[in-house]
Image (cartoon, rainbow, N blue to C red):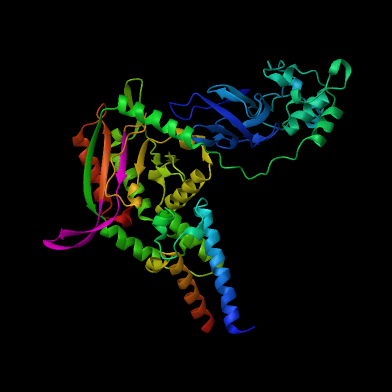
Amino acid sequence: MSETNLRNIVQEELSKIVQEELNNIAPEVDLATVDPAADLREALDIDSMDFLNLVTALYHRTGIEIPEVDYPKLATLSGIAAYLATKLKSANTV
Amino acid sequence: MTEFRMPSLGADMEAGTLVEWLVKPGDWVKRGDIVAVVETQKGAIEIETYQPGQIEKFLVDLHSRVPVGTPLALIRTEGEAKAPVAVASPLVVSPVAPMPASPVAPPSVAAAPTPPPVVSGVAARMPASPAARRLAEERGIDLSAITGSGPGGAITSTDVERYLASAPPPAEKKRALWLDPAAMRAAIGAAMARSKREIPHYYLEHQIDVTPCERWLAEKNAALPPDSRLLIGALALKAVALALHRFPSFNGFYRDNKFESSKAVHVGLAIAIRGGGLAAPALHDTDQLSLDDLMTGMRDLVQRTRAGRIRSSEMSDPTITVSSLGERGVDALYGIIYPPQVAIVGFGNVVTRPWVVDGAIGPRSVVTMTLAGDHRVTDGHAGALFLAEIGKLLQEPEKL
């Protein structure tokens, strides 16, 4: 399997995890309709407790410990995907 | 024998619907155990027992709507002799004498024959064999649902077994989130209308610098995994709870034309429910909790409230309410007191504002706090001091 394929699979898996966890928090929202660049707090009406629960769930499922200073990078769906991918990549290349 | 009754979960509640038993006859319960789930206008509430003992029998069928105060079950208190009608376990009737060495003789079953309890409810009137009755009780089945094949239409244990075999499998254990937005809206409307009708509100607002809180939190949380991180809301809740020690006239209930302050501080946390709706269940003994425990309690309370798992004591115990609507971006909110409470404290959004510190203007994180107080109990003067005290406590987050 090429490295690109593998990366795509990981990306897909990560995106699935994010979708599942956001769905737990805001079950009534169809994530397919959310603009990947929209502010999640507004688009999904999530508060700081919801966001902390999201960060906690992502930590448990991916092992990526998201420090508070990085929270602004996770403001959008695309931001979360990019952040997690970068973190995983840096973990793998070490 | 004690009756476990449909509780009143707020002044505006008249009736509730029993939707689930979380125990069965014969189970032992202790104070605070969750016994049943009741549907109210405010959603499904888990009902705790204040009476420890053994569940003797159920008195109300599932899905019946009954007025507040209706006995739902009988609980036999420890040491109370088992009623003859329910003598089921061979252990209880075994002829073994109480241990003579025992310093306190346990009450002997044979020596203290309690008269059969006055049994109310449908189950008692159905002709049924003792074995059938016992089996039905064990499985929490209503005998009236079973057709008897015994003499005179009496229900036999075989009938019960047949019924059990034919009955649909028990519903999935995970409870469906019961929430009727229209009913909840009506309940909120009724409580707020009563508040505005009866409580002469006064309103105050006060801006405070929460930069010390933010700095302290950033430093503390940087070293912690997400599970253990604190939110600024936890600091706010603790500061309010501690300030009430000096200002007890904001903590308690106004009932029967007089105010009774509460020794315990149970801060009600206003929690928005998705799809519209609001609940403000108590975080018990808020003032006694460490910040870590308070945060854990807050997370649990928010999660359970949104999942429809609030407990009855959390509904009835709040002695004051805190609302942090600032989460949704507004600078300030002017709360309506939830009767019979006498105060509600609001926290607005944390915003960066030019602020004078030590004679120089600089950017600081600022929050607008508000208080709605009950003029029957306090004046704005006391309210101002109360808000100032909360602000002062938030200047030294490490001491909270």
Q: Nearer the viewer, residue A45 or A32?
A: A32
User: Most prominent secondary structure in the magenta stretch?
Assistant: strand
Q: How many marks?
A: 0
Residue B322: x percent and y percent?
Answer: 35, 42
Residue under the point 31% across and 44% down? B346
The verdict on residue B357 being magenta is yes
Residue B140, placed above or below residue B330: above
Residue B382, placed above or below residue B65: below
- Which stretch appears magenta? B343-367
Residue under the point 53% across and 61% down? A19
Residue B112: x percent and y percent?
Answer: 72, 19
Quarter that holds the N terminus of chain B: top right
Residue B298 showing in the rendered view: yes
Residue under the point 58% across and 25% down? B65
The verdict on residue A63 being magenta is no
Q: Nearer the viewer, residue B357 or B310?
A: B310
